[in-house]
Image (cartoon, grey):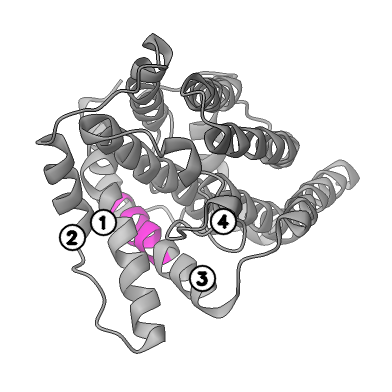
Amino acid sequence: MEPVRIIQPLLALVLSPLLFGIINRTKAFFAGRKGQPLFQTYFDLWKLLHKGVVYSKTTGWVFKAGPIINLSAIFLITFFIPLGHSRAVFFFDGDIFLVIYLFALIRFFMILAALDTGSSFEGMGASREAQFSALTEPAIFLALAALACGTGKLSLSEILVSITSRFWLANISIILFVAATLIIVLLTENARIPVDDPNTHLELTMIHEVMVLDSSGPDFAFIVLASALKLWIFAALFVGVLVPDIGFGFWLNLAIGVSAVFVVSVVVGIIESCIARLKLLFVPHFIFVATVFAVLAMVFVLRK
């Protein structure tokens, strides 16, 4: 492991809360408003870390451990996510499966923590989270499998490093289908419009936010930071697939990767400004489109 690579997860930890600020300012621009400060998420995290924690009498150790496990696992994933076509801190053949199952571990404890409160509303959100995640997993599996078959690699770092400009031009249809899959999965996994509205206060329509209604203080700060890291990870994957490696050095590739992640947050803000939230009954159809794109990518790979 090259010591310089450790800067990638550190950048994710420090800069990921800024993505929420960029999205909110983009939405404010389209709405003709000034919007909240760009660094509002940092202020919120600082305030939450200095507050006390309130636990319901019905909750147990699962609810208390949920946010810590959530943040620890998502931060561990950043050590396997390359940024700017530079290899990640850790990589090995099959690390794709480790990353996906770490996401499953996070989701498992989030659902358990929501159910541990004994709240019917949080149980409803946990049910929706389980349903939609079950629909996104085949899409992300097939998309990554298409890239693995196309590049002949089983490591995320090796796959993304292999997406050079020559590979990109020779497999443009595969790249575009995988990128389309990843942007839909990004919106779904991060509870963004059109799947969910992170700013809603209507409990009957909430998915992710309703699962953390009982969290407070540092626990809620861990959840917010974990959500920011999750958005950063999916944006980094999307950028790694869509933007080819032109052959620059580590630092320039890293700068391009970070800038592209910020551009993705602007795109998310534009998407949320231009379309409305889908009805819950139509969300599975939206996710199914991602699976169709992933299947098409696999078909094009197998035809080559």
**SS at mark 3?**
helix
Dot 2 falls on a residue whose secondary structure is loop
Q: Earlier in the sequence, mark 3 or mark 2?
A: 2
Sooner in the amino-acid sequence: mark 2 or mark 1: 1
- For the residues labelled 2 and 1, the Cα–Cα distance comes to 6 Å
Q: Work out whether residue 303 or residue 48 is closer to the camera in this orientation and state it.
A: 48
Q: Do the residues bearing badges 4 and 1 touch, measured as CB atoms within 8 Å?
A: no
Categorize mark 2 by other alpha carbons within 10 Å: few (<14), some (14-19), many (20+).
some
Q: Is residue 92 above or below residue 283?
A: above
Q: Is residue 75 left or right of residue 139?
A: left
Going from N to C along the chain, the mark reached first, 4 or 3, is 4
Q: Main secondary structure of the magenta part?
A: helix
Find disc 1 in the rendering and name its residue.
18
Residue bearing mark 2: 39
Amino acid of disc 3: Glu
To which residue does mark 4 refer? 196
Residue lying at the far left of the rendered structure: 50
Tell whether label 3 touches label 1 (CB within 8 Å): no
Camera-nearest residue between 30 and 87: 30
Magenta segment boundaries in residue numbering: 254-263
Q: CA distance from mark 4 to mark 1?
A: 20 Å
Between label 2 and label 4, give the one nearer the viewer. 4
Marks 1 and 3 sit apart, C-alpha to C-alpha, by 17 Å
Q: Residue at x 71, y 62 (%)?
A: 279
